Image: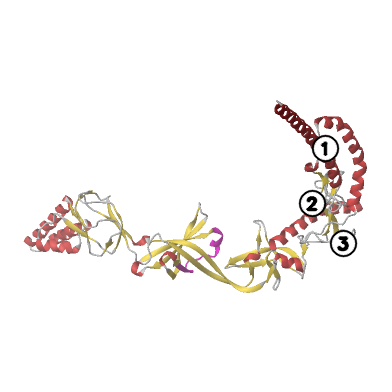
Amino acid sequence: MRNNNQRRHLACLLSLILATGSQWSMQALALTDDSQHHQHPTSVTTQGEYYCPMHPQERSDKPGRCPICGMFLVKDEAAIPPQSPVSETAGATSTLQPKNQDAPSAAPHQHDHALHQPAAANPLKVQKIVSRADNDTGPGGTIKYVCPMHPQIVSDTPGNCPICGMNLEKVNVEMDSPQQAVQVNVSGQMQQALALKTAKTQRATLWHYVETVGEVGYDESQITHIHSRVNGWIEKLAVKSAGDEIKKGQLLYEIYSPDLVNAQDDYLLAQDTLQRSGNKARYQELLRKAGLRLQLLGMSKTQINQLAKTGKTQYRVPFYATNSGYVKKLDIRDGMYLQPATEILSMVSLDKVWVIADVFENEQRWLAKGQTAEISIPAMGIQGLQGKIDYIYPELDPMTRSLRVRVVLPNNGTRLRPNTLARVSLFGGADRQALVIPQEALIQTGKQNRVIVKTADNQFVARPVEVGMMSRGKAQIIKGLDDDEDVVISGQFLLDSEASLKGSLMRLSQPQEAHHAENHH
């Protein structure tokens, strides 16, 4: 009994201790949360809710401008402390009202402070015309103020960009003459960083030269079409398929034709009549006409002589090849019925071949019949075949806008196969003592050709040029450059863009200069 009472007392004491400890823990946790809640606004206030997008280290607790670049400070959403809905509703009016009252007075102070701060140096700018501290107009020039971030923002007076708030940079635009070349200044260090390279203009001999592609084809003058001159049936066909080689005198086919049989009988009858009449002139003419008829129907003189010698009619008349070549097309088989309109086969000789090359439309002006051509067949390992332009076709291909040129080549041993692609080099006349530059120095825009000329150690000018012939990496300059001038061959596109920007500023200044001149007069 006594032990049971002791156990009950211990259990009550343990329950009391546990309940008291949990209350102490909850109070300590609440005190910790209150401490963190009071510390958070202090850190936000210390760092500032507003920062510069270009210079994040510049922060402020009020709206304004960056003291380095002048850009508008933006609010840091991550730094805004969380608030309860009750406190936000209750303090909305009191929080916003002081800010609206302080903003007009703070903004002018920040604006004036930003205008007196020096702008950050930009190492990537190729052209630095004048410093921002210089407010005087250069000789023959006009001062313009441009936003570094938004070049389309141009002003006649100092100020800030309405888009980003940055300070406008001063640019001196020369206005000596509307036709004056736009000059770009680049320091030696920046030239080395941009890897600018130059080359001198020089006099050289340029050959009219075109490298194009062509295709090997049949010599169409060597194609032969074989037709039967009588109606009949093919009794035997000696040619089996297209592509077979045919030798001169080789049997092509045998035909049975009633017309040929009748013509042979008429010839034999005329021959017998002549012999019985004692070789009278009248019957001699009859025999001659009978033999001519056999020739016109396709029989050879050898076959006619054999017919006269044997006196026997041939019912299966053989026909032989009159020249050598290859079967190009075969349209008949054994037992077929033939008519004069039926093409038995076509054959072509490969002793000569044509190479048809396509030349661009703008290169046709100097092509002429008889000019030298060099043919290479990369697929067959054939190089340096020499030929001449045999024919220039009278019209351009309307789809490819190219002109076809024909070159005839001998084909000893049938090395060249039709329908094989070929590399064709055409050589024309020469332009001697032409002013040339490397072709990579040209800036071709479609409307105008320009080059960048180095006029001094640190000065470059964009100059329009008139281009003549271009051949093998060289371009002929007809107008715009002189001898021994330095043209930029690497990095010229960056300089051209800078010159175009400055030229735009010059065009913007011209109407205003004319307006001031009219008011003065």
Q: Residue furthest front?
A: 2
Which residue sits at x=47%, y=69%?
A: 374
* Label pair 2/3, CB-CB below 8 angstroms: no
Highlighted magenta segment, given as a residue range: 361-375
Q: Looking at this view, is 308 or 126 the one in front? A: 126
Q: Disc 3 designates what residue?
A: 138
SS for callout 1: helix
Above or below, comparing residue 306 to residue 430 in the picture:
above
User: Is 363 included in the stretch rendered in magenta?
Assistant: yes
Quarter of image, res 265: bottom left
Left or right placement of residue 180 versus residue 310 in this view: right
Left or right placement of residue 284 versus residue 77 in this view: left
Above or below, comparing residue 384 to residue 262 in the picture:
below
Q: Disc 2 designates what residue?
A: 54
The circle drawn on residue 446 is none
Q: How crowded is mark 1: few (under 14 residues within 10 Å), some or many (20 or more)?
A: few
- Amino acid type at image mark 3: Gly
Which residue sits at x=9%, y=62%?
A: 310
Say if residue 335 shows up in the picture. yes
The N terminus sits in image quarter: top right
- Amino acid type at image mark 2: Met
SS for callout 3: loop
Tell me the mark number nearer the camera, choosing from 3 and 1.
Answer: 1
Q: Where is residue 424 in the image (x, y as percent from the top left)?
A: 48, 65
Going from N to C along the chain, the mark reached first, 3 or 1, is 1
Real-space Cα distance between discs 3 and 1? 70 Å
Going from N to C along the chain, the mark reached first, 2 or 1, is 1
Q: Disc 1 designates what residue?
A: 31
Which residue sits at x=89%, y=48%?
A: 111
Say if residue 73 shows up in the picture. no
Tell me the mark number nearer the camera, choosing from 2 and 3.
Answer: 2
User: Is 110 included in the stretch rendered in magenta?
Assistant: no
